[in-house]
């Protein structure tokens, strides 16, 4: 697939341009290469020296990440940033990054991916950010214990950052906003949900959750945001016929 064709495809699939005004990330092709044809795409959560090196070693033409290098402000090409850029250029590896659109996508977004993993039904947009609902809420067909939800979320050796078991024992309703969205627990409380799942842990919401009697899982930023790139890689492979691989580089955070 030609790089310009892939760019149009991804911008259309992910509604990138529609969210440009509210996302601090510069979504899209962040670093080009001399390659005009893309056959092999590596996918990772973070743009980092190690993800660039592993993508190049695998023979990727392009690396797709959720957390890119550019976030709407000028950044000097020195130090670690210089080493990252140098690695991309020396490897002739293109970098494509998509932040908020990949969190909220209903088919292959981070939050939809978690909801699918947990087996939630009757999904609805949830969790307001700058006027847009970027997460999802849903319901279990049969109630689950908090331990059962954690076990399903943390399969394959994954671990949470923390759990607040302050709500009902039988969980039926769940709200999900991946990444750094502890404050959005207020939306879950306002909607009367039994459980809220996000990535980053936050001391400041502890007493609010305790007093509101809601269960919370701080799954970790990485754990809650690996699903979008995984699902997108599967879609590119099945529907477009590209070779894809997911580079699992967990931070434990």
Image: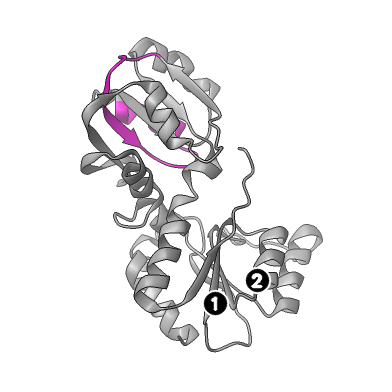
Q: Quadrant of the N terminus?
A: bottom left
For residue 230, the mark is none
The reply, left or right, for residue 236 in relation to residue 88 is left
Q: Nearer the viewer, residue 251 or 204?
A: 251
Residue 178 is covered by the magenta coloring: yes
- Crowd around label 1: few <14 · some 14–19 · many ≥20 (10 Å): some
Residue position for label 2: 58
54 to the left or right of 62 = right
> In the structure shown, which secondary structural element does the residue marked by tag 1 occupy?
strand
Q: Quadrant of residue 212?
A: top left
Q: Are marks 1 and 2 in contact (CB under 8 Å)?
A: yes
Name the residue at 46% across, 77% down.
242
State whether residue 126 is above or below residue 31. Answer: above
Q: Residue at x 52, y 83 (%)?
A: 38
Residue 40 marker: 1
Q: CA distance from mark 1 to mark 2?
A: 9 Å
x, y percent for residue 99? 47, 56
- Position of residue 102 relative to residue 124, above or below, is below
Of the residues under marks 1 and 2, which one precedes in the sequence? 1
Q: Quadrant of the C terminus?
A: top right
Residue ID at (55%, 37%):
158
Segment colored magenta: 166-188
Whether residue 183 is visible: no
Residue 43, x across and y down, in percent: 54, 63
Query: Is 130 placed above or below 71 here?
Result: above
The residue sitting at the right extreme is 79
Q: Look at the numbered disc 2 and give the secondary structure of its residue.
A: helix
């Amino acid at each position: 697939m030609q790089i310009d064709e892939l760019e149009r495809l991804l911008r259309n699939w992910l509604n990138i341009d529609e969210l440009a005004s509210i996302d601090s990330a510069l979504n899209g092709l962040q670093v080009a290469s001399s390659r005009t044809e893309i056959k092999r795409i590596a996918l990772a959560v973070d743009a980092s020296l190690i993800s660039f090196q592993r993508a190049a070693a695998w023979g990727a033409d392009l690396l797709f990440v959720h957390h890119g290098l550019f976030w709407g402000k000028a950044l000097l090409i020195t130090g670690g940033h210089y080493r990252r850029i140098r690695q991309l250029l020396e490897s002739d590896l293109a970098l494509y990054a998509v932040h908020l659109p990949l969190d909220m996508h209903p088919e292959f977004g981070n939050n939809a991916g978690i909801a699918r993993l947990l087996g939630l039904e009757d999904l609805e947009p949830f969790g307001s950010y700058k006027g847009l609902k970027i997460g999802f809420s849903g319901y279990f067909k049969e109630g689950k214990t908090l331990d059962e939800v954690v076990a399903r979320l943390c399969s394959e050796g994954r671990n949470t950052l923390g759990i607040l078991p302050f709500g009902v024992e039988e969980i039926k309703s769940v709200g999900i906003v991946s990444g750094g969205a502890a404050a959005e627990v207020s939306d879950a409380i306002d909607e009367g949900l039994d459980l809220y799942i996000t990535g980053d842990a936050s001391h400041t919401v502890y007493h609010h959750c305790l007093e509101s009697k809601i269960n919370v899982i701080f799954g970790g930023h990485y754990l809650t945001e690996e699903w979008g790139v995984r699902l997108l890689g599967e879609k590119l492979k099945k529907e477009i016929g590209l070779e894809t691989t997911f580079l699992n580089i967990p931070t434990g955070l």
